[in-house]
């Protein structure tokens, strides 16, 4: 498949790929280079993701936004990661222009109403409580703390500890991060569609994505040096109410994008990937232990 790219004058980036399908579906993902490693306030990136669904000047409420997608049967979702946040839409080709326009309004013009901010703080806290009840979440949190110690990668994206009264998200600090990082030059859009590249480019050019940035300031580059691992590290946590033992073994390997990633993926599949992998056969088939 051929990939085409274009950077608008304000720095907003478009990556396009022609769909290899006769199904008239356009997939859209907007990426913002803002995740938990960039935060000055723990939990801010995840909270901002939530707030981008809560209303803009053109669409004052959450319902005004979601109805735009629901009435055409489009899929809408978002995720926060350590290095970026993304907003995802899948829709019929004929609705692509409108969906891109609404997305641009959502991510660039969130009003951050104090009323909705206070309500949404309860939502993210409830999500964190649900995570706190999940043993696999604790395994993941402990693993990252060991693998990436002394860097922001060691911190969870969101956690119940971020929502105590002492560490409650301050409205002003969160809004400041939003205005700094949610700028067109710090974003990009990836689109897979049956529509042509020129058609998609024209659609994007008519949205808020290509407006002049409301402010221009340098987005901090984060370069972290990880200490070389020496001894095997171990963390064991007892959790009340959990009747099973959850075990995870992890290895730090190469950087993202390194060519060895492909070789390591093959090795991972052989050792631990599918139902014919060595770990699956040894643990589940031979000893009847739950494994995934």
Image (cartoon, helix red, strand yellow):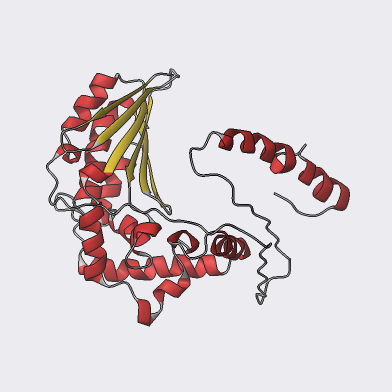
Horizontally, is 209 left or right of 88 in the view?
left
Q: Nearer the viewer, residue 119 or 182?
A: 182
> Which residue is depicted at the point 58% across and 36% down?
260
Horizontally, is 258 left or right of 52 in the view?
right
> Which residue is depicted at the point 67% across and 40% down?
268
Q: Nearer the viewer, residue 181 or 190?
A: 181
* Quarter of the N terminus within the rendering: top left
Residue 267 appears in which quarter of the rendering? top right
Residue 274 appears in which quarter of the rendering? top right
> Which residue is depicted at the point 28% across and 21% down?
197
Q: Position of residue 239 (x, y in %)?
A: 65, 75
Q: Position of residue 96 (x, y in %)?
A: 28, 30
Q: Nearer the viewer, residue 159 or 26?
A: 159
Q: How many marks?
A: 0
Q: Is residue 19 above or below residue 133?
A: above
> Which residue is depicted at the point 58% across and 63% down?
146
Q: Nearer the viewer, residue 63 or 257?
A: 257
Q: Position of residue 142 (x, y in %)?
A: 58, 65
Horizontally, is 266 left or right of 166 in the view?
right
């Amino acid at each position: 498949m051929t990939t085409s790219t274009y950077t608008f004058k304000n720095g907003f980036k478009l990556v396009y790929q022609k769909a290899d399908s006769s199904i008239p579906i356009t997939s859209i993902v907007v990426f913002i280079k803002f995740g938990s490693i960039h935060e000055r306030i723990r939990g801010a990136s995840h909270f901002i993701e939530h707030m981008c669904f809560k209303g803009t000047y053109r669409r004052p409420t959450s319902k005004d936004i979601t109805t735009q997608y629901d009435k055409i049967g489009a899929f809408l979702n978002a995720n926060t990661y350590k290095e970026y946040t993304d907003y995802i839409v899948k829709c019929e080709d004929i609705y692509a222009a409108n969906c891109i326009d609404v997305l641009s309004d959502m991510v660039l013009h969130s009003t951050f109403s104090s009323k909705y901010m206070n309500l949404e703080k309860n939502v993210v806290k409830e999500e964190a409580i649900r995570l706190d009840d999940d043993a696999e979440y604790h395994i993941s949190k402990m693993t990252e703390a060991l693998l990436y110690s002394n860097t922001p990668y060691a911190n969870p994206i969101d956690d119940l500890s971020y929502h105590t009264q002492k560490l409650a998200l301050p409205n002003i600090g969160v809004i400041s991060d939003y205005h700094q990082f949610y700028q067109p030059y710090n974003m990009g859009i990836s689109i897979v569609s049956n529509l042509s590249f020129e058609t998609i480019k024209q659609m994007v050019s008519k949205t808020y994505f290509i407006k002049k940035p409301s402010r221009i300031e340098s987005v901090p580059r984060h370069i972290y040096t990880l200490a070389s691992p020496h001894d095997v590290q171990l963390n064991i946590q007892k959790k009340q109410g959990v009747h099973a033992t959850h075990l995870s073994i992890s290895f730090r390997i190469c950087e993202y994008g390194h060519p060895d990633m492909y070789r390591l993926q093959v090795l991972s599949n052989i050792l631990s990937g599918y139902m014919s992998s060595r770990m699956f056969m040894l643990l589940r088939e031979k000893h009847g232990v739950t494994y995934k």
